[in-house]
Image: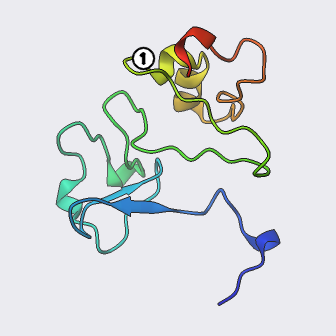
Amino acid sequence: MKVSVSNLSLMKFNPFIFVNGRSREIHLPDFAPTSKMDRTLLGTQKDCSDESKGIFYRMEDMFCWALDFPRVSANESAWRYPKERSSVVKAYKKYNEWVTNKTDLSWFDSTISGNVNEEELY
C-alpha cells in the first residue's frame, strides 16, 4: 500500500525498535506495544508503563524511553544533545514542563532564546 506524504500524520506514526529479541520493544512515549511484545515486561524495573491508563515507555519520573525530533528539511540543524554526564533536564529548560503537559513542542528548539543552557550542550 502506497501512502502519500501529505496523508501521513506524524503524530500517529509509531516507529519502534526491539532489543535482544522481538518480544522486547521500545516505542515512543505512550504508544502501545504491538501484539508481539512480552507484556509481562511492562511496568518492571524502572519502567512505569500502566496499560490501564494508556501510559507506556516512561520511567518513574515520567521521562521517556525514546524521543523523536522532527526536522522540516535535511538542511535544518539536528537536535543538539546534552554533553556526557549532563541531562536533558539541565540542557533544555522546558523539558520537565513538556513531560508533564505535552503541549509546548518548542522545548527542544535551541534557536529560541531561553530554551537551552548552552553550557550543557554539544
- In the rendering, at what x and y percent does residue 25 appear? 32, 60
Task: Tell me which residue sits at (59%, 63%) in the image.
Answer: 13
Vertical placement of residue 56 versus 20, above or below: above
Q: Amino acid at mark 1?
A: Ser
Vertical placement of residue 103 versus 113, above or below: below
Q: Quadrant of the N terminus?
A: bottom right
From the image, tell me which residue sits under label 1.
Answer: 86
The residue closer to the viewer here, 58 or 115, is: 115
Vertical placement of residue 67 versus 59, above or below: below
Viewed as shown, does residue 111 lie left or right of 57? right
Task: Tell me which residue sits at (51%, 43%) in the image.
Answer: 67
Q: Quadrant of the C terminus?
A: top right
- In the rendering, at what x and y percent does residue 73 appear? 79, 51
- In the rendering, at what x and y percent does residue 119 appear? 57, 9
- In the rendering, at what x and y percent does residue 114 appear? 72, 11
Name the quadrant containing residue 59. top left
